[in-house]
Amino acid sequence: MNYIERIMNSEEVASRPPVLLDIGASEGIHPSWRPIAKYCICIAFDPDAREFSDAKLRHYFRQLHSFDCVVSADSKKQAEFFLTHSPYCSSLLQPDTDKLKDWAFAPLFDVEKTIKVRAKTLDQVLKEVGIDQIDWFKVDSQGMDLRLFKSLGKDRYQRVITAEFEPGIIDAYEGEDKLYQVFQFMENAGFWLSDINIKGSQRISSSVLESLFPNRSLRKLAMFSHKTSPGWAELLYLNSFVNKNIYSKREYLLGWLFATLQGQHGFAYELAQAGQTKLGDALFDELFQHSERLIKKHIISSNILPYIGRKAGQIIQRIIG
């Protein structure tokens, strides 16, 4: 049975389609959204037109609202925007060249131009498009992820079901939101960390690389052969549904679906149980059973083999002394 279709066509979800927010949308559709995109409304932002085109996104979604402006946490109508050598590093925040100089990827942050761009708050945008909630918040704002999430206001952000951030570990921008700040806030806000992917660069300056390897190809090879150190992290949070009184059937259905899409079948199982207890709807019984089947099915998946190997090794070690 196609539970994506079943949930998306339910009265509660079809009447208020899922809303996906993508701040920093230049890389195209988010892979996790592909199975659900045709049922969803997407609000996408990217002020750096060198890589962003809404044509990359439009045909995927039920409805797309795209904005070639920056999202600001305050109400200013214009803002300075730093266009860097890499479009993926452009930001409202100025790159911290002094702190970056020791890192191999520093040239990506070289500011090629500073421009004035239109700025809007998330509250302004949501009012403009006639939407009041965000279900999946995905942001890569180059240093401002947490403050933009907070700018939704508590009534909105506590109803977000999935939230993704890319905060810095090292200092790449002046005054940026850092990883430890996201950890602290999201734990207190009622979310739990489902995934973390540490990304980074090499702690060797481009000037050292140039002096050691005048040849550009060799320099690039030397850079990527050097040890990579943590520089930033990709985080995915799921709402814990702690305050059960504020969530409707719609949120429980989407919570189960988003958790299932992330392979978090244990949490999906718990949400289906909670939804059934609160709402008494037969659909939650089906979702509960589906999660149970998936949990049991994964016992024989390849993920269990390393565990079995470790246990077997421990037993053999005890036998031979």
Image (tube, rainbow, N blue to C red):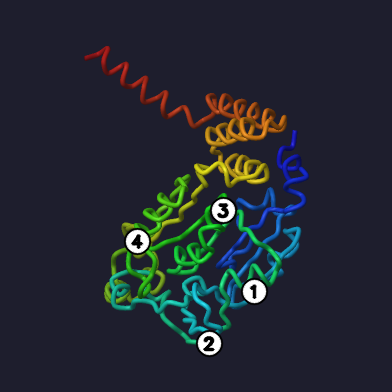
Mark nearer the N terminus (2 vs 1): 1
Q: CA distance from mark 2 to mark 1?
A: 15 Å
Q: Closer to the camera, 245 or 301? A: 245
Real-space Cα distance between discs 4 and 2? Answer: 28 Å
**Within 10 angstroms of label 1, few (less than 14), some, or many (20 or more) residues?**
some
N-terminal of the pair, mark 4 or mark 1, is 1
Residue 67, given in percent of the width and then of the height, sits at: 64, 74
Residue occupying the point 64% across, 67% down: 126
Q: Is residue 227 above or below residue 175?
A: above
Q: CA distance from mark 3 to mark 1?
A: 21 Å
Q: Callout 3: few (<14), some (14-19), or many (20+) C-alpha neighbours within 10 Å?
A: many
- Image quarter (top left, top right, bottom left or bottom right) of the C terminus: top left
The residue that disc 3 covers is 160
Which quadrant is the N terminus positioned in?
top right
Q: Which residue is mark 2?
A: 116
> Which label belongs to residue 67?
1
Residue at image position (67%, 61%) is: 42
Residue 169 is tagged as: 4
Amino acid type, label 3: Val
* Residue in the picture at 77% in, 52% down: 15
Of callouts 3 and 2, which one flags the residue occurring earlier in the amino acid sequence?
Answer: 2
Residue 302 vertical placement versus 208 (above, below): above
Label 3: element kind: loop
Q: Amino acid at mark 2?
A: Lys
- Quadrant of residue 124 in the image? bottom right
